[in-house]
Structures are given as structure tokens and as C-alpha cells.
Image: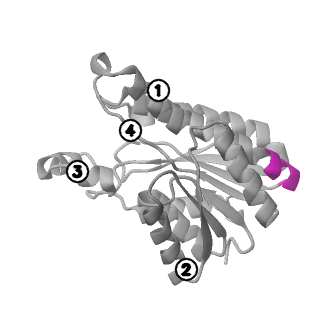
Amino acid sequence: MKLKGKVALVTGGSRGIGRAVCLRLASEGAFVFVNYIRNEAAARETLALIDKAGGEGKAVCFDVADYKAPTEALAAIVKEKGRMDILVNNAGVSRDGLLVRMKEQDWDRVIDTNLKGVFNCCRAAAYTMMKQRWGRIINMTSVVALSGNAGQANYSASKAGIIGLTKSLARELASRSICVNAVAPGLIITDMTSAMTEEQRENVLEEIPLSRLGTPDDVAGVVLFLASDEAGYITGQVIGVNGGLYM
């Protein structure tokens, strides 16, 4: 088991990509804390799947956008488990709309959750990881951080900010054997893409060289690798998981 004895926190871990990441990390021996903000039932379902697969985990409820909440949550995790090894910043929201029609609260909500939330959690986890002289931080960005996308100025900006944050933290924390990387999914089969019409789906597939949408497991496999000892010489990188949509 690649992660036996490790303790992980996955934000937004109750469904979609986050759930797949939780299951993959737990299957390799990590004790996984599954973060959620509202949908406790979904978080419990993730835990049930972890248990069924022979893994261990626990649900933790807090809002990553709240400056104090991640610090309090991480302190409780370290008190309980004595360590914090792997942080996967997956929690995110979208409030799409053209720039000229975008409301201030839609901009603020996306930036606060997607970008400030990553800062809050990284800051909370870094101190413990520095003391341990080992850690893995994996930040979920997006293909649109690199390509841009009409109607997603707020989302694209938040995800692009994560890339800059990732590279800066990689430089700050490298001396303590903490690797910080980002994963940039393309179009993945989640609740968000399930709302696409068949015409929209066909148009998208024409732009993807591998001619299919990605799955949460496609992303989870990359996260597992980055969380493991095998990725000990990889830091400050952005790994695209997009079927060739953006190269």
C-alpha cells in the first residue's frame, strides 16, 4: 500500500472528483478525512464506499472560504491523528456568466471558495508538514485556467490563481520535503457536465483528441501518484488530465 500510515484531507470530497480521490487514497492505505460543507448524506455515502473497499475515513464539515475554519479543522485532525501528510484542495464552485452581466457576489463567491479556500487550507496544513519535514499538497485547478473560457471569467481567474499559488508554495516549502503540485482536469463526467445537451457534448468531443470525456477516476489516479513517494522529485508542476483538449 503506497500510502499506509498517511493521513489525508480532501476538500469537497463528498462527490464527483473529490469522492474518487478519497476512494483512491483510502484504497492505498491513507486515513482520509472527507470534507463537505452542506451535503452530509453525500459525505456519508463516500465514507460507506471507503469502508466497503476496506479503507478508513471520517467526515469533517467546514467551509474552506472561512479563514478560521480550515485552521480549526486541521488542528483537530492533527490532535486526533498526530500528523497531516496529504492535502488535496478540491472544493470549488462556479457561478457562470458573461463579464458585463456578472454580479459582484458571483465573482466574490467563486474567488473566495476556489482561490482563497486553497490559501486557507494550505496555510493551515503547511506548519504541521514543515515540522514533519514531509508533505504533499495537490491543488485542483482546471484546463480553463490555461485556455480561458467565455462566460467563466471568475472561475478561470480563480483557477489560474491556484497555479501561481502552487508554484510559489512549491518554492517556499521544498526545503522541508513538501511537494506542491496542481492537477488541471479538462471535461470530466460530473454533475456539472451531466447538464450538457447532446449537441453540446458532441461539439466538445470533436475538440478532444481522445474522443471521450474524462472520468473522476482518471483524475484520481494522477492525484494518487502525486501523493505518493514515487512523486518525490516532482514539485511546482501542473499536470493536465484533459484527453488532449489543451496541449
* Three-letter residue code for mark 4: Ser
Q: Name the mark nearer the viewer: 2 or 3.
A: 2
Whole-number angstrom distance, CA of label 4 to CA of label 1: 11 Å
Element type where label 2 sits in the image:
helix
Choose the circle earlier in sequence order: 4 or 2.
2
- Does residue 202 lie above or below 83 as drawn? above
**Residue under pointer 1:** 108
Q: Main secondary structure of the magenta part?
A: helix
* Three-letter residue code for mark 3: Ala
**Quadrant of the rendered image containing residue 227:** bottom right
Choose the circle earlier in sequence order: 3 or 1.
1
Q: Residue at x 48, y 76 (%)?
A: 49
Choose the circle earlier in sequence order: 2 or 3.
2
Q: Position of residue 124 (x, y in %)?
A: 73, 44
Which of the pair 150/241 is nearer the observer?
Answer: 150
**Residue under pointer 4:** 94
Which of the pair 96/214 is nearer the observer?
Answer: 96
Element type where label 4 sits in the image:
loop
For the residue carrying disc 2, how many other residues have a C-alpha within 10 Å: few (<14), some (14-19), or many (20+)? some
Say if mark 2 contacts mark 3, CB within 8 Å: no
**Residue under pointer 2:** 51
**Residue under pointer 3:** 195
Element type where label 1 sits in the image:
helix
Whole-number angstrom distance, CA of label 2 to CA of label 3: 30 Å
* Three-letter residue code for mark 1: Asp
What residue span does the magenta drawing correspond to? 127-133
